[in-house]
């Protein structure tokens, strides 16, 4: 599913005619509270937010878990 808004940070995506500006790599994270790996598409700012708040709490607040 694709969104115009990034779920973790709440920022809107830049809508450029060239798709090279919209790169969000997929990251696989291990969530110890769940005991499994989760794959998410997240920006560098989103990773920083997850590092600060914790991956489980951030993904839960975003409604991804």
Image: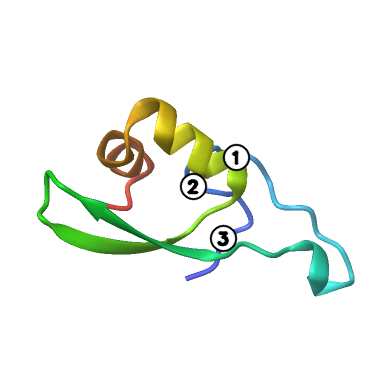
Which of the two labelled residues, at mark 3 and mark 1, occupies the earlier sequence position?
3
Kindly indicate the quadrant of the structure image that contains residue 45. top right
Q: Which mark, residue 45?
A: 1
Single out the residue that lies furthest toward the top. 52
Q: Position of residue 60 (x, y in %)?
A: 27, 41
Residue for point 73% across, 63% down:
22
Q: Is residue 34 left or right of residue 19?
A: left
Front label number (3 vs 1): 1
Disc 2 secondary structure class: loop
Residue for point 32% across, 40% down:
55
Gap in angstroms between the C-alphas marked 3 and 1: 17 Å
Residue for point 37% across, 27% down:
53
Confirm or deny contact between disc 3 and disc 2 (CB under 8 A).
yes
Q: Position of residue 30 (x, y in %)?
A: 25, 55
Q: Residues within 10 Å of mark 1 (few under 14, many from 20)?
A: few
Disc 3 secondary structure class: loop
Q: Which mark, residue 4?
A: none
Confirm or deny contact between disc 3 and disc 1 (CB under 8 A).
no
From the image, tell me which residue sits under label 2. 7
Which of the two labelled residues, at mark 1 and mark 2, occupies the earlier sequence position?
2
Q: Which mark, residue 3?
A: 3
Q: Is residue 18 left or right of residue 31?
A: right
Q: Position of residue 44 (x, y in %)?
A: 60, 46
Does 44 appear above or below 58? below
């Amino acid at each position: 599913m694709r969104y115009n808004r990034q779920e973790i940070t709440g920022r809107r995506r830049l809508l450029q005619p060239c798709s090279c500006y919209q790169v969000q790599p997929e990251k696989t994270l291990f969530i110890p509270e769940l005991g499994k790996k989760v794959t998410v598409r997240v920006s560098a700012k989103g990773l920083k937010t997850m590092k600060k708040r914790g991956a489980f709490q951030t993904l839960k607040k975003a409604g991804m878990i």
